[in-house]
Amino acid sequence: MININYVLDAKYFHLNPCYILPHSYGAGIMPYRIAFTGVHGSGKSTTAVKLAEVLSKRYGYRVLVVEVEAIGDSIVDHGSPVERQMYFASKFTAQYLYHYYDGYDYILYTSHPVMTVPYTEYWCKNPALTIMCACIAEMLPKPDLIVHLSVEKPEDYEIIRQRILSRQDRDTEVEANPDYIKYIADMSKVHVRAYTMTLGIPLLEIPARLEVGERVQRIIEYLGVR
C-alpha cells in the first residue's frame, strides 16, 4: 500500500508530495536515483508515480518520488522571463539536492535542473543565462540514470499538445503552442544528450507517445529489477 506523505522543503516552505513505500533499507546503501526529462506534457510525473507503484507493489522496494516543479508559484505568473528562469533554476536545484541523500532504495525525480536550459534558451534569448543553467546542472551530483521521454515522429507533437490541453493547472494558450512544444521537445533532447554524454550518465530514451504502462515496462526491463 502506498502512503502519501508530504516532505517539507525547508528552504522554500513548499509541500512536495512524496510517495513513501514500505521496504527495509540496507544501512550504508546509497539510493538509485532516476531523473525524468522531456518537454512539458511528455509524461514525466505520471511515469515517475507509476514506476514507484510498480517498484513498490511488485518488487517491494522503498521509493521516494520528488516533485521537481515551480509551476503555480506567483513569480512564474508575474515575473519577467529572466526572473522566472532564474527562479526555476534555483528551485529545481534546491528540490533536486534536498532529497539527494535520503535513505530509500530508489529516488525518482519528476524533472531535473538540466531541463531549465532549453526553457531559458527559449524565453530569455540570453546565451550567458543559458550557459549558467547548463553549468549549474553539470556541477550537481549526478543521477544514476536519466530517462528522457522523447518526441520522435511528427504526429507526436500533436499528442503532447492534446495532453497539455487536457490539463487544468497550466496556461494552455502558451504551453500548447505548437512551435513552443516543438522547440522545447527538440532542444531538450539536444541538451540532455550533451549533459549525459559530458558526465557519463546513462541515458534511456523512451517515446513519449507510449502509454504510461509501456514506458514503465521499458524502464523495468532496462533496470533488470528482480
Image (tube, rainbow, N blue to C red):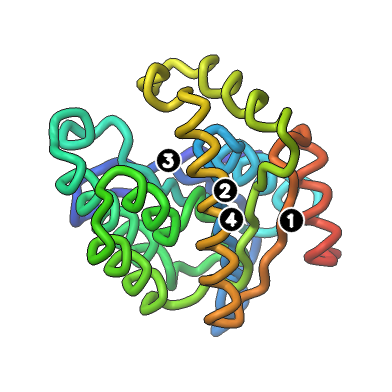
Mark 2 or mark 3, earlier in chain: 3
**Do tag 3 and tag 1 residues touch (Cβ < 8 Å)?**
no
What's under tag 1, amino acid-wise? Answer: Gly
Kindly identify which residue carries mark 1: 60
Q: CA distance from mark 2 to mark 3?
A: 29 Å
What's under tag 3, amino acid-wise? Answer: Pro
Kindly identify which residue carries mark 3: 17
Residue depicted at 51% across the width and 62% down the height:
191
Q: Secondary structure at mark 3?
A: strand
Answer yes or no: is residue 138 visible.
Answer: yes
**How many numbered badges does the structure rendering display?**
4
**Do tag 1 and tag 4 residues touch (Cβ < 8 Å)?**
no
Q: Secondary structure at mark 2?
A: helix
Mark 3 vs mark 4, foreground winner is 4
Q: Secondary structure at mark 1?
A: loop
Disc 2: CA contacts within 10 A as few (<14), some (14-19) or many (>=20)? some
Relative side of 166 to 100, left or right = right
What's under tag 4, amino acid-wise? Answer: Lys
